[in-house]
Amino acid sequence: MTIWRGKDPLILASQSRARRMLLANAGIAFDAVPADIDERSVQEKSGLSAPGEIAGLLAREKALFVSSKNPGRYVVGADQTLALGTRLFSKPGGRAQAAEQLRLLAGHTHELHSAVAAARDGKIVFSDVGVAGMTMRRLDGSEIEAYLDQAGQAVTTSVGAYQLEGLGVHLFERIEGDHFTILGLPLLPLLAFLRGEGQLNV
């Protein structure tokens, strides 16, 4: 069942499993079309350093890239950054990097900045950035290794080496923020925008 009113489905400029799940569960008809952009190059050229601004820029660039190839369609781009103080994290390249990230994050509160942007006909028509505070419990080396053993390769697919909707929930003692922001897509403001555009039945 879909509540999408548009002639053509929404386009999600991402292959993220979590983002696809959120849209599908919300009854949105969509096509997933990943944006083929060099994120690190875009970030470096921008000169931006604030994690929220970087996430917002990348979400907009993804939406614009896919929108330029799909005239008339609503395209949603999204991005998420993880910051511990002034230090930004990227997806770990393997188990060793995942363990190092967990060692640095354990016992501290880090921030997830999740951005969403919508484009149509090559122009940004909506954008929003949400922030969530994530307090990871103290973890010793054996606990980190046990978690990595259980989580497997999934730890390399998400910044911070965890997925909150999976085994990563065991790493935390406190979470402050919107559930959808934590999963990488500020869904409520996006739905409000699409409703305002007359694209939803509810």
Image (spheres, grey):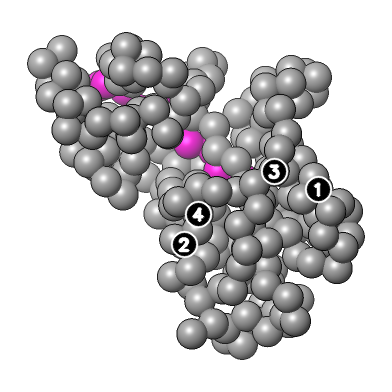
Q: Residue at x 49, y 21 (%)?
A: 89
Disc 1 designates what residue? 64
Q: Secondary structure at mark 1?
A: helix
Residue 26 in the image, given as x and y percentages of width and height: 48, 72
The Cα–Cα distance between marks 2 and 3, rounded to whole angstroms, is 19 Å
Disc 3 designates what residue? 35
First reached walking from the N terminus: tag 3 or tag 4: 4
The relative height of residue 174 versus residue 202 in the rendered view (above or below) is: above
Quadrant of res 155: top left
Q: Residue at x 75, y 81 (%)?
A: 7
Marks 2 & 4, CB-CB < 8 Å contact: yes
First reached walking from the N terminus: tag 2 or tag 3: 2
| Dot 4 amino acid type | Arg
Q: Quadrant of the C terminus?
A: bottom right
From which residue to which does the magenta span run? 106-115
Disc 2 designates what residue? 22
Residue 134 in the image, given as x and y percentages of width and height: 36, 36
- Residue lying farthest to the bottom in this orientation: 201
